[in-house]
Image (tube, rainbow, N blue to C red):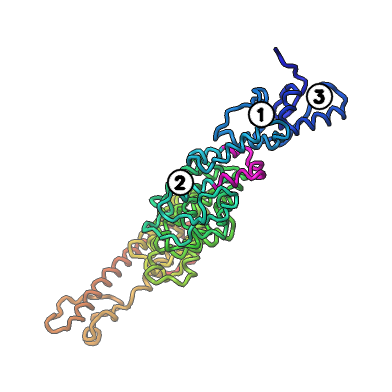
Amino acid sequence: MSLHCDLQVYVNGQQTFFLNEKIISAYSGRLKKIIKQEKRRTQIKNSGIEIDDFPGGSNGFELVLRFCYSGGKIEITVSNVCLLHCCAVFLGMSEKVTASNLLQQTEKFLEDMFYWSWNDVVASLKSCETFLGYADSVGLLSKLICALLAKIAQNSDLNLINSSSSSSSSPEMASRFRFSSAETTPDSKSPFSPSKAWWFDDLTVLSPLIIEKVVKSLGAHGSENNSLTLTRFLLHYLKTVSQRKGNATGFSASTKSDYIGLTDTAVHGVILVGKTAFSCRGLLRVLRIVSGFGISKDCRVGLEKLIGGMLDQATLDDLLVSGHDRGVYDVNLVVRLIRVFVNGDGWSTQKMKKVARLVDKYLGEIAPDQNLKISKFLGVAESLPDSARDCYDGVYRAIDIFLESHPSLSFEERSRLCRCLNYKKLSLEACKDLAKNPKVPPRIAVQALMSQQSYVQPAEDFLPREVTKESPAMNDGQIVVYGGIDTDSIEEENHDMKMNLQRMQWRVNELEKVCKQMKGHMSKIVRHPSSSRSLPRLC
């Protein structure tokens, strides 16, 4: 016998259901009331009503219809109990309307949630994602979170969670759970494995809003986070989500906003434990992950301050953080980290020189980037004081690579690029290469050679006093090496002076060769009107 459909119900603007008014009114007090009001208003026999914000949308309403058209019976499972419960509350399907109604059946099923398996609790939480707001408003979400935390507490060997009553089914139990702040720091300083707890992976299937609700129920949200375990979980969660999505930077702005609370909470936890639990490499990995989701300015500054203070422990690979603009790498980040290190008070001369070597390697790595601006290159090169480098060969090699990758630079731009060089701290080989380099402006080459010449100390400073006073060997700046000195009659320190003299003679001879080459080079340049400038004499 077919039933007459005399009622149309529009659910969340998604779907229209044609129903029998008598059947649906027998179980739903709210629909029964709405139908009566609609009939009095329109005086139409076959009426239609609209329902907005219905939990679960058309899928939830279809489950309710199955219950109604099956004589008040439906199979309730851990996967659908939350949706059925919220629908029953929304439609007023209580015992006031009929005995053993849907609301009573779901409540009875939920009473045993603290005896469910771990997977059942997680599955039920997962099922709430499409109607999270309503599940939270009726108190269902907090009950499930309490059951979840109880399972973690009952099945953890370590004292990860403190609980005064892990067996209580009261909703207030959530306020009694706290991640222990007195956790033992693991030997490994990795922010991820191997200190991963057994429950980390299982919770990565939950939405960020549910995870944030869990964190808030622990009283550890934002700056209140003092748990290393919770911090490690949040980092693991964010890392897993970014890997599943392919790249966190591809998230929409609205999606990223769901994660900001979690990223800030994780960063606060990292800053709290700092160097005791995280290496510089680990901190940079943390920064990579949370930056993809977005963090507050205060959290970013705090994390960068922590990383910058440990910059001497970083490697080149650690600094190669992908850029979010046109550049390949995030050069601005590295500049900020270097400034933190330089302005800090925890560095020594040895650490500073170690950072300088790292920065020079970084310059060589970023130099081929055709989108890298001169200002950013100089920002990195000049972020360290001159005393940090004993030699500028690394900086020159990076400049050479930059010039090779940017052939369209003007004369002024090439000159500007070379301003970060200290010519006196260039090796002879680097200076010779610079002088012959056609990409380097001639004026820069001249300055470099003159600096090398002025850097050569007078030969008299390296000669024994007997030689400088008694021998006319120093004529017109010529240096003569005395090989016939009787070593048996001269002290050991004079032997060192002799060796220094020999090295200086070789250095001067090399410079003389370069000067001759530069004279020929200059004579060709001055033939062109654009290059007819007054040049200083080289030799």
Q: Residue at x 50, y 41 (%)?
A: 115
Q: Residue at x 82, y 29 (%)?
A: 36
Q: Residue at x 70, y 12 (%)?
A: 1
Residue 199: which disc?
A: 2
Earlier residue among tags 1 and 3 = 3
Left or right: 244 in relation to 54: left
| Quadrant in the rendering for residue 392 | bottom left
Q: Residue furthest front?
A: 99
Residue 183 location, x and y as percent?
44, 60
Q: In the rendered image, is residue 233 in sight?
A: yes
**Where 21 falls versus 298 (above or below)?**
above
Q: Secondary structure at mark 2?
A: loop
| 10 Å crowding of disc 2: few (<14), some (14-19), many (20+) | some
* Contact between labelled residues 3 and 1, with CB atoms less than 8 Å apart: no
Earlier residue among tags 2 and 3 = 3
Depth order, front residue of 193/114: 114
**Where 482 falls versus 285 (above or below)?**
below
Highlighted magenta segment, given as a residue range: 127-146
Total marks drawn?
3
Callout in the foreground (1, 3) = 1
| 10 Å crowding of disc 3: few (<14), some (14-19), many (20+) | some
Depth order, front residue of 330/278: 278
| 10 Å crowding of disc 1: few (<14), some (14-19), many (20+) | many
Residue type of the residue flagged with mark 3: Ser
Residue type of the residue flagged with mark 2: Trp
Q: Which residue is mark 3?
A: 47
Q: Which residue is mark 1?
A: 64
Dominant secondary structure of the residues highlighted in magenta in the image: helix
Residue 120 location, x and y as percent?
51, 38
